[in-house]
Amino acid sequence: MYDCAIIGGGPAGVSAALNLKLLGKNFIWLSTHAVSHKAALAEKIKNYPGLPDVSGDGLVRALLSHAQAMGINPVEKFVSGVYDTDGSFTLTAGNDNYEARTVILCAGVQSSAGIEGEEGFVGRGVSYCATCDGFLYKGKTIAVLCTDKSFEHEAEYLCDLAGKAYVMPLYADYKIISPNAEVILKKPSRLSGGMRLEKVWFKDDSVSVDGMFILRGALAPSTLVRGLETDGAHVVVDRACRTNIAGIFAAGDCTGRPYQYAKSVGEGNVAAHSVVQFLAENK
């Protein structure tokens, strides 16, 4: 079991990882990308101390280089759930599970808004992990919402398993090839059903499905961790980056504005030190 699991590869995640390493803790760092893909797209960053006019790509390279120099590399996995298991936490990532005594959420802010009814059908027809749950829908009818080109291989995997797949790419230049796929160039507005998901609705029509896969780079914190206190899209934390769940901390953009790299790095540092204090008090 790890002392801590860090979720997210942005500046907050890097900062938390560096500090936990320096503080001698055993941890795993999980991120969809090696280091924040979003941060790398910034043209110029003018307010990061000591690095005037650095590009987003330049900052990301510097952060990753620092981590690698200390022997730290993120495990490129998408975490789809965090579960409290009697004083520790189990993290689900693809076909793998990881156990940790504490968790630091550094997963940023969900870039695309959730769908009305989405959270109510999680585990009852809505899934965020193709490899975890895809086999449950072999030969069935599914919807696949794909928010980024990097998820196309997962979308095609799901299409090949399903009998019929309604694919909704939310970006241009999509290339999803499968005889079972029907592309719908509309964003779903709500989900409905009884005990399980039954329909995906658009503005003026709907499709009937057995399940839906939502392929996003990040999940809403309240979806990732059930019972987590949030304020809109943000995790509620105190000055020690503690959440309302003992043993779970949060840092970076997911805790709210300002969305600044310097703020994220500082909170990652604070969260790491709070983890160490928590572990000392809960041996």
Image (cartoon, helix red, strand yellow):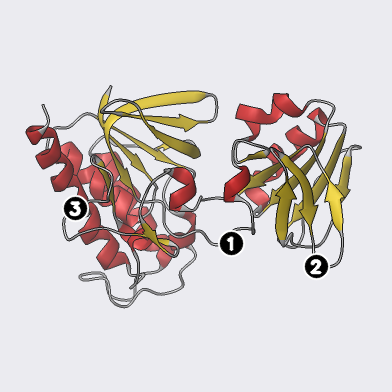
Which residue carries the number 3 mark? Answer: 269
Alpha carbon distance from label 3 to label 1: 28 Å
The secondary structure type at the circle numbered 3 is helix
Residue 172 position within the rendered picture, expressed as x and y whole percent measured from the top left: 75, 63
| Kind of residue at disc 3 | Asn
The secondary structure type at the circle numbered 2 is loop
Neighbourhood count class around disc 2 (C-alpha, 10 Å): few under 14, some 14–19, many 20 upward: few
Residue 200 position within the rendered picture, expressed as x and y whole percent measured from the top left: 77, 52
Alpha carbon distance from label 3 to label 2: 44 Å
Residue toward you, 196 or 30: 196
**Residue 117 figure quarter:** bottom right
In this rendering, which labeled residue sits more in front, label 3 or label 2? Answer: 2
Task: Report the residue at 17% width, 61% height from top.
Answer: 239
Neighbourhood count class around disc 3 (C-alpha, 10 Å): few under 14, some 14–19, many 20 upward: many
Q: Earlier in the sequence, mark 3 or mark 2?
A: 2
Q: Residue furthest right?
A: 179
Task: Report the residue at 71% width, 24% height from top.
Answer: 135
Which residue carries the number 2 mark? Answer: 203
Q: Is residue 106 left or right of residue 200?
A: left
Q: Earlier in the sequence, mark 3 or mark 1?
A: 1
Which numbered marker is on residue 112? 1
